[in-house]
Amino acid sequence: MSRALVLLAATASVGLAVATPVAAATFTSLAAAFDNAGISDNANPTAANLDGSGNSLSAQDLVAAGWSPGAAITVDNTPFTWPTAATATPDNVVAGGQAIDVTGRGSALQLIATANNGPITASGTITYTDGSTAPYTISVPDWFAGNAAPRAVGLPHWNTRGGQQTASIKLYPESVPLNANKTVRSVTLPNVSNGVAPGVPALHVFALGVRPGPGAWTGTWSAAPDVVSSVGPWTQQTLRMVVHDSVGGSAVRVRLANTFAASPVVIGHVTVAVQNSGGGATGTPVSLTFGGQRQATIPAGGELVSDGAAATIPANANLLVSVYFPGPVTFAMVHSLAQATSFTTPAGAGDHTADVAAGAFTGTFGFWTFLGDVDVMASGRPGTVIALGDSITDGFGSTVNANHRWPNLLANRLTNPHFGVLDAGISGNKVVSDQFTDFGVSAVNRLDRDVIDQPNARTLIVFEGINDVKGGTPADQVIAGIQQISARAHAFGLKVIVATIAPFQGWSEFTPATEAAREAVNNFIRTTPGFLDFDQVLRDPANTLRLLPAFDSGDHLHPNDTGYQAVANSINLGAL
């Protein structure tokens, strides 16, 4: 195939010059297609122009976030390399229908992109080596005014003609489903613009990568991040987190995430063991490495997936995942409602990740931090079931340290086939509204990270919406959110099962209007294929607007252990 070269109106997009492709082309790499300089040094802020109005990303802010030139970064389980271009030279491509050679196969193609004068929704094409093609559509928010919730990384400034100014600048991960049985040859970018100019919408792509196939891995435990919290500082300190797995296996790996963060974090050492009691292990913890090294750094917004390690991991067991932080760590991504007690050494105690005894772990805490997933090599066919929900899925009202969340109880029933069950519940979470500082981003905006990129994701159970309707969100917006979740999950090959919203009469936000919204959403859900009727399972037959008293934790919203067991028992295992 001949390669046409793109001739630029300027050798680089410097100052307010506009880099305009004369003709569409096929490029051997994304870097070969770069035609816009969008990153500038703080000392020379006018040397780049991302938006046509002289504004650009700060090179120093990117380095401070760990997104330095040539950095290897993983976002949503997809590795990519940040551009190596020198400051004020082309470092991104303005999407104008260019075809970019891509080699590999996997579950998704991911772009790190942003829009100016956006948001932008546009379509492109995936071409496979067998000659077949598939269309795709991405929606990219504006780099300045766009929603911060789905960002890959956020920066605190932008560089302008008048110098650096405080601003909320975002780069976004955009995932495109791939046919995992085919090899990608190229991706044709959306034809949005042929350059940058004041007031003109443009879509900028900085990096892309193929999400690797999951192989034989199955998710056995996960926790969705809900907030960045001030901590410690943790300096030369080991945290030993207690997690309850679902399916066992012969090997283990973990995914650590620095989601929502503003700066990198150094991980000194990670181990996994089976809990004996308290902070003590039943045997020597298994040491995990990252690219063969014990110590690794997670960029802001990035992830680390460990190498797999041989280990005997029993099903439905408590595991100890110990993480050593050389520190200092002052802010951390957390999952706030663990419903489990974990353990910590004092600051300065050093690396105790390999300890079998509990003696060094003199403190306790009740959240999970940096730990996103635990995966295993399970026997039989790999497969992961993910429960996407709010506090009822998160287990609020269940007995602490008893693992009586309904996804745990469902996993207890799933002995054959041996699918993993992941709990992606966040207390207070909503389907369509982001609550970034308290209850996590919306289910719509966290779907890729918390569900789609899980290993061998098979089935999604959506049990969410109570916080939307009792908070006054119109039923049609909640329904539209559920439809959006279902459509995107289906595009990635997942089976989707939606559960009706449970009754909540007696809770402070119960009114005739909020009840009407709940009933409207439930009427829609009951038209979806294979729905689960958790409303019918949990309600009082004598008063269908409230929880059955025997299932009520006491607040008239959250079930108790018995109610959670009833939810788990109601699920047809064959439908998963």
Image (spheres, helix red, strand yellow):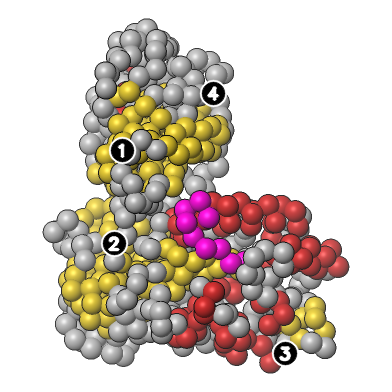
Q: Is mark 1 on a helix, strand or loop?
A: loop
Q: Distance between the residues labelled 4 and 1?
A: 32 Å
Front position among marks 4 and 1 = 1
Residue at label 4?
201
Q: Is residue 339 left or right of residue 206?
A: right
Tell me the kind of residue under disc 2. Answer: Gly
First along the sequence among labels 4 and 2: 4
Magenta residue span:
490-498
First along the sequence among labels 3 and 4: 4
Do the residues bearing badges 1 and 3 touch, measured as CB atoms within 8 Å? no
First along the sequence among labels 4 and 1: 1
Residue at label 3?
549
Q: Quadrant of the N terminus?
A: top left
Q: Residue at the location (35% across, 19% down)?
A: 25
Tell me the kind of residue under disc 4. Answer: Pro
Instruction: Give percent across and percent down for residue 391.
Output: 58, 71
Front one among 399 and 166: 399
Instruction: Give percent across and percent down for residue 60.
Output: 31, 33
